[in-house]
Amino acid sequence: MRMASLRGVDAAHLVLADLDLAQCLFTGTVHLDQVRLEGACLFAKVPPGLHWQRWRPQRFARRRLLAEEHHWRARQPRAMSVPPRSWW
């Protein structure tokens, strides 16, 4: 099953089991520290590939993400996908 949103929910003592949370929005949810995840709860994955930070290629750490991080990354200025021509 897929959950779309927990926005504005008081999640105290909430138990989520066997849910696809890859697109679930958590903004505005209170007491997230009290949510219990059971079974196979799926989260979004880190975008593949490299990004450039201070002129050095960096890989994203392999971890699970909340959908809000994907939305946040989409609003950030685009990182360069290749080094500038001055490096060639």
Image (cartoon, helix red, strand yellow):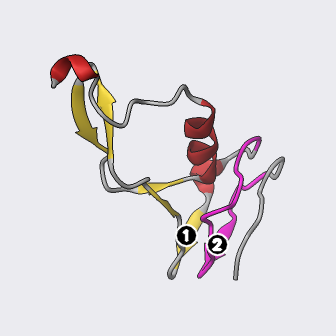
Q: Main secondary structure of the magenta part?
A: loop
Q: Between marks 2 and 1, how big is the CA–CA gap?
A: 5 Å
Residue type indicated by callout 1:
Leu
User: Which residue is found at the position 69% from the left and 65% from the top?
Assistant: 14
The x, y position of residue 6, in whole percent, is 77, 56
Residue type indicated by callout 2:
Leu
Q: Which residue is mark 2?
A: 16
The x, y position of residue 16, in whole percent, is 64, 72
**Which residue is the extreme one toward the right?**
8
53 left or right, relative to 45: left
Q: Quadrant of the C terminus?
A: top left
67 left or right, relative to 46: right
**Which residue is the extreme one toward the left?**
88
User: Which residue is found at the position 58% from the left and 49% from the top?
Assistant: 33
Q: Quadrant of the N terminus?
A: bottom right
Give the mark count.
Answer: 2
Front position in the image: 78 or 39 = 78
| Mark 2 or mark 1, earlier in chain | 2
Few, some or many residues within 10 Å of mark 2 (<14, 14–19, 20+) = some
Q: Is residue 22 found inside the magenta-colored segment of the image?
A: yes
Q: Which residues are magenta?
A: 10-28
Q: Which mark is residue 37?
A: 1
Helix, strand or loop status at disc 1: strand
Helix, strand or loop status at disc 2: strand
